[in-house]
Amino acid sequence: MQDSQLSSEALPQHIAIIMDGNGRWAKERGKPRVFGHKKGVDAVRKTISTAAKLDIKAVTLFAFSSENWRRPEDEVGLLMELFITVLSAEVKRLHKNNIRLRIIGDKTRFSQRLQKKIAQAEELTRNNTGMTLNVAANYGGKWDITQAAKVLAQQVEQGELAPEDITEEVMSKHVAMSDLPDVDLLIRTSGECRISNFLLWQLAYAEMYFTPLYWPEFGEDSLIEAISWFVNRERRFGCTGEQIKALMDK
Ligand code: IPE
Ligand code: IPE
Ligand code: MG
């Protein structure tokens, strides 16, 4: 296949990533788990810039699950601090790159300080027209579907909606990221092959890519490899990483 034959339409529109393996990566290097989380931030930056260069419409990153509160208190505390620091440090750059940032998940459990940072970052980048970056924090797929059900139940209670009018389309409008296309490529690092209560509704037809790399090891080439795998699965022809890279330079 010639380079020119691969068009950006073949690329996934919405990539979701379960960024896993920070702890094991650190442990293998004799360091505390938090060292892995800090290193993971570099991988986040690389992923965002590569996806933006490829004109991917949306990227959704799993940063903290609703189950992650069960981790030791000091690890949770550090993750929250890291979240605040990274948000403060990166939001300007995201804005400069025309990226719209949104946090999905139940934000009510976060500190007031963090909630305020999140609101400011979302507000600043709200009208950006480039890539949408969704960060899933205190997110759970079951929570997402449940909160949508609650909204619809309230509408029924108030006589605004009849139960027989609850269709898949109506439900779709009330789960997270209803304005974006469903995820077409899910990536999970660290060799685990499960969803861990990440997006459920939105993954209904996603291709799932599992790599043994730990999240801090995931770089530009790793994302390109995952995307080539996706293109080859979807289109049943052999495109190369080089062809994907060629799209970045356009
Ligand atoms: C993923 O890495 C990051 C978060 C869940 C916040 P882990 O912390 O789960 O690392 P492992 O899976 O224990 O190696
Ligand atoms: C999923 O990873 C959550 C995030 C990446 C934020 P976990 O490491 O928490 O998932 P399990 O516990 O292995 O299923
Ligand atoms: Mg893990």
Image: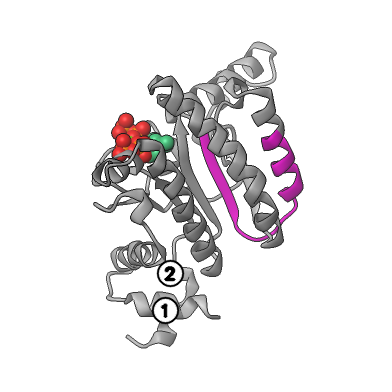
Span colored in magenta: 117-137
Return the residue at label 2: 10
Q: Does the magenta run of residues contain 120?
A: yes
Disc ID at residue 82: none
Between 134 and 169, the one lying in front of the other is: 134
What percent of the width, then of the height, locates residue 208? 31, 50
In space, the residues marked 1 and 2 are separated at their CA atoms by 7 Å
What percent of the width, then of the height, locates residue 127? 75, 52
The amino acid beneath tag 1 is Leu
Q: In which quadrant is the C terminus drawn? A: bottom right
The amino acid beneath tag 2 is Ala
Disc ID at residue 6: 1
Relative height, residue 88 to residue 217 (above, below): above
Which quarter holds ligand 2? Answer: top left
* Marks 1 and 2 close (CB-CB < 8 Å): yes
Q: Judge left or right: residue 218 versus residue 149.
A: left
What residue do we see at 37% from left, 67% from top?
Answer: 221
What percent of the width, then of the height, locates residue 237? 28, 74
Please say whether residue 200 is visible from this viewpoint: no
Among the 4 quarters of the image, the one containing residue 30: top left
What residue do we see at 54% from left, 63% from top?
Answer: 49
Farthest residue, direction top: 157
